[in-house]
Image (cartoon, rainbow, N blue to C red):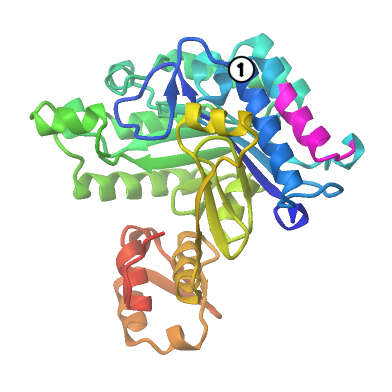
Amino acid sequence: MFSEMPHLYLHVPFCARRCSYCDFSIAVRKRVPAGEYVAAIEGELSTLVQRGVVASGDVFDTIYLGGGTPSLLPPDAISQLLDAIRDKLRIPHSEFRTDLEVTLEANPEDVTPDNAVAWRRAGVNRVSLGAQSFDDRVLRWMHRSHDAARIGDAVGILRRAGITNVSLDLIFALPAELGRDWGRDLDHALALEPSHLSLYGLTVEERTPLARWISRGAATAPDDERYAAEYLQAHLRLTTCGYRFYEVSNAARDGWRSRHNAAYWSGRPYLGCGPAAHSFDGRARRWNLAAWEAYRRAVAAGRSPLESEEVLTDEQRELERVYLSLRTAEGLHLTAPYRLLPSLTVWVDRGWVEVRGERVVCTPEGWLRLDALVGDLTGRHATA
Ligand code: SF4
């Protein structure tokens, strides 16, 4: 039931081009089929209501438009999507919570004064900006379509439009030959005083331009030492500046955590709509057809766009709970089987975890070894 899934994710699959490291489920389009996309989401919401997956009369806590590049949608399409959520689920406008968190992922080049004002008017109150780096040479290598100056401009435009909750995404651990100055990028990001920062280490995914460059020797694979050094550098720099890492990759000023992302890490149910979107009801995980055209055709034919589902066993749910809990600053509640593990003392002695009352919490060095810690605790390697 909807009342148990107060977190809604809409996957917007369109991008102007593919970034060099990205293997997400996207559809590269010069012209975004906004009308078809809105109609498809409306269709999926109707299907969910008919199947009783969601019901009317309750309120969301968070809505997250992710992608892909949701900011490629025209502002009136974003407004229509939020209206469709209210109307299809028959939620009176007055029942939309005033503190509803509505996040839009945006690329800096899409942040214009007109767009920002229209997003705010549509109900968007948080923007996650794909900054990635403040080095133009690095941005070109990544195949990003903005330059460094555009990031600061975008933050200013959003603030003037009344969107003060701005998060910046940055990527670290880039190949050494790029000569990227991570400390300088952190300085630039902090100078913009974002409320929130998300830091992602570069990973090499199959079938990406980066994987091809590495296979023919045109780029080197990211190395673990650089990853660890840059992660620890960022952790120290951000915490010194008043940010708190509330999750391994996410830091925020007090009061500015992402409630949507926090819901994932605490294992709360969420509903996903759009191609490749995942849903979780606390017991089963379901996911939609990944390709935009296949998804669109299914919805247009009145069929469910669900591709498959996986019902988690008790063991899988416990493994996920341990893994997700240890990702967060709240850590893992030390229930009996874990409290007695001899390895716990070893980790504490090595400075990888701290035991705080009834909870075990990773240090930054522990977060670098998260998979090993979870494997040690559970006797299994994490798959989440
Ligand atoms: S904008 Fe985001 S989703 Fe689109 S190609 Fe780049 S990294 Fe992937």
Tell which quarter ligand 1 is in: top left
Does residue 377 belong to the magenta stretch? no
**Which residue is nearer to you in this view: 61 or 293?**
293
Q: Residue at x 50, y 22 (%)?
A: 107
Residue at disc 1, secondary structure? helix
Q: Residue at x 39, y 18 (%)?
A: 17
Q: Residue at x 25, y 34 (%)?
A: 174
Rendered view: 337 above or below 181: below
Does residue 81 belong to the magenta stretch? yes
Location of residue 281 by image quarter: bottom right
Q: Return the residue found at the far front.
A: 301
List x then y, in percent, for residue 355.
47, 77
Q: Is residue 68 visible?
A: no
**Which residue is nearer to you in this view: 249 or 192?**
249
Q: Looking at the figure, which quarter contains the C terminus?
A: bottom left
Q: Which residues are magenta?
A: 79-92
List x then y, in percent, for residue 295.
53, 33
Q: Residue at x 61, y 63 (%)?
A: 282
Residue on which disc 1 sits:
34
Number of marks drawn: 1
Q: Left or right: 321 with respect to 116?
A: left
**Which residue is nearer to you in this view: 276 or 196?**
276
Q: Amino acid at mark 1?
A: Ala
Secondary structure, magenta segment, majority class: helix
Classed neighbour count for the residue bearing mark 1: other residues with Cα under 10 Å, few (<14), some (14–19), many (≥20): some
Rendered view: 166 above or below 154: below
